[in-house]
Amino acid sequence: MIKDERHFQEIMLGVDEEMIREQIPVFRRTLVAFRKVSEKLNIDFPLGGFGFTNTSPRVGIYSGHDLSLRIQKWVSEKYGDKLKFDFDLGAIAVEITGAVYKLRLPMVYGKIGVFLDHKSVGKTSASGGLNLFSMIVDLTPGLAAQLPNAECEKLLSLFLLGMNVFNSMRANESEFLSIAQSDFRTATSHLLHQPPELGLAKWAILQAVEKIIKDYIMRHGGNFNKQKGHNLAYLADIAEQQGLPALDKADLAKIQCDAGIRYREPQIPVSEVLLAQNTALKISLRVLNFT
């Protein structure tokens, strides 16, 4: 536990000296500082400012979001523009009252409680927990207050699913999984583009799932016909031969699409793409759990 500002400064100076000795690239030093402080103090806290409007830590508070903000501010004041790093694991798209929003998936060390409170959207929680509403970009407190419980539960389930998928891909590092993370991010960007690029979004979702299945196949000593590399049912059959429990072919069909979809052939509704994304996350986690 950090006692006061002097104690905090001592810890940060020591952490910074370690990073310099270890030749940590400057752009990574905020992230590494979070990890080192967490390990030194044996405490959990979220990474980064999480987009809160109050970007300054509260006086005398050295835990939770306040500690996160202090670390980020300390490193930022020393290294400035040489940092520039996105601390989120990724993002997915969610539909709220007919509009598509970006749901951020933050990187978190340790265990952090997640709650929903429309009154504290964009504000730091005194408990140090994570307000899910603050992870939904551009969601207003007024709209958050109007959401029924069923909608809130759905958002929470999608958030936890997305966090599990991205954390699993990060933990089982490989070239395929690294690209799959990028594919999911790309799909979200296409969905949020104005106007949305729905065909490109669904194609990127397909790409993400096929890479996750291919990663499983390669890890377990299998191989696949590259000419059939976009066929999820084919890849699933190969993966099952390598020990993966059978995947639901109906779910795979919700994601499957032809290359022509990138050129809006055929035109598809946003609901189809969101269904593909959510199904893809479910399938991805199932595969990753057996990786």
Image (cartoon, rainbow, N blue to C red):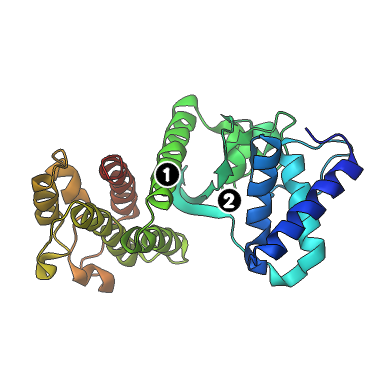
Type of the residue with mark 1: Gly
Residue 175 location, x and y as percent? 34, 64
Residue 137, disc? 2
Examine the image and state in which quarter residue 16 appears: bottom right
Up-down relation of residue 9 to residue 147 (above or below): below
For label 2, count other residues whose C-alpha is less than 10 Å away and answer few (under 14), some (14-19) or many (20+).
few
Q: Secondary structure at mark 1?
A: helix
Up-down relation of residue 55 to residue 114 (above or below): below
Q: Which residue is labeled 1 in the image?
A: 162
Which residue is depicted at the point 43% across and 52% down? 170
Which residue is depicted at the point 71% across and 37% down? 41
Residue 50 location, x and y as percent? 65, 48
Quarter in which the C terminus is drawn: top left
Q: Is residue 55 visible in the rendered structure shown here? A: no
Examine the image and state in which quarter residue 87 appears: bottom right
Type of the residue with mark 2: Val
Precedes in sequence: disc 1 or disc 2: 2
Which residue is depicted at the point 32% across and 42% down? 285
Examine the image and state in which quarter residue 287 appears: top left
Up-down relation of residue 230 to residue 280 (above or below): below
